[in-house]
Image (cartoon, rainbow, N blue to C red):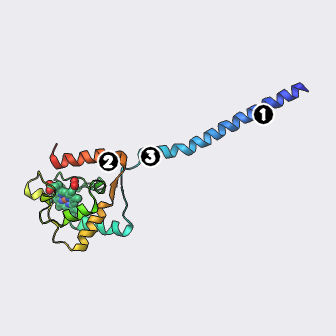
Amino acid sequence: MWDRINWLTVINTVILLFAGALVVAIVQSMLKPQVQESKNELPFYTTADPALERAGSDLYRSLQCRNCHTIWSVKSVYQAVPAPSLDGIGSLRNEEWLYRYFSAENPQAILPSRMKEKYRMPSYASLSESERRTLAEYFASLRVRDWYLDETISAEQKKLTGK
Ligand code: HEC
């Protein structure tokens, strides 16, 4: 009689231990991919909807901004100018600032340049208002995650000041 009860207790304990281990394993496997995802996460993202994304990148391409700038860390093979990367620029400058900058006859009055004349940010004041609005809206939508903000700011400062 006592033997039987002891055996049942042992078997119950073993079953409970297995069940416990299984639950721990399941919970771990559920948590693991999320931890890895946040470590491998890209620091740059956009809040643009597909229409703005298309309109913005079309202008970026047709106006050849990429001769001087990088975006999504992709470089044009013709690029020789150390202009700031535009990845995450919307976390550094807001839409109003960008609109004023793109509309300025002399962008260097807003942001001083250390470049020779021909490498400086050109004026886009002659574009239509809606094109300048689209550019401002699109670049304001390019953001950087908080954990990469400091690096992005110091890379930008380095490009702007050469230090
Ligand atoms: C001839 C090279 C050149 C071209 C083309 C060019 N840029 Fe620039 N851009 C620069 C440089 C250099 C700077 C840094 C300021 C300066 O030196 O005038 C700059 C600055 C900027 C900034 C401010 C960056 C910051 O750190 O705040 C933005 C935004 C920008 N450009 C967007 C654009 C867009 C959008 C286009 C295309 C419509 C474009 N640029 C075309 C050279 C260029």
- The tag on residue 20 is none
| Residue type, numbered disc 3 | Ser
The location of residue 88, given as percent across then percent down, is 30, 54
**7, above or below 32, in the image:** above
| Residue type, numbered disc 1 | Asn
Q: Which quadrant is home to the C terminus?
A: top left
Judging by the rendered image, the residue that carries numbered circle 3 is: 38
- For label 3, count other residues whose C-alpha is less than 10 Å away and answer few (under 14), some (14-19) or many (20+): few
Name the residue rendered at 78%, 34% in the picture.
Answer: 12
- For label 2, count other residues whose C-alpha is less than 10 Å away and answer few (under 14), some (14-19) or many (20+): some
Mark 2 vs mark 1, CA separation in Å: 54 Å
**15, above or below 38, in the image:** above
| Quarter occupied by residue 132 | bottom left
Judging by the rendered image, the residue that carries numbered circle 1 is: 12
Mark 2 secondary-structure assignment? helix
Q: Which quadrant is home to the N terminus?
A: top right
In the image, taking residue 88 as reference, residue 36 lies left or right, namely right
Nearest the camera: 138 or 22? 138
**Residue 67 visible:** no
Q: Earlier in the sequence, mark 2 or mark 3?
A: 3
Judging by the rendered image, the residue that carries numbered circle 2 is: 149
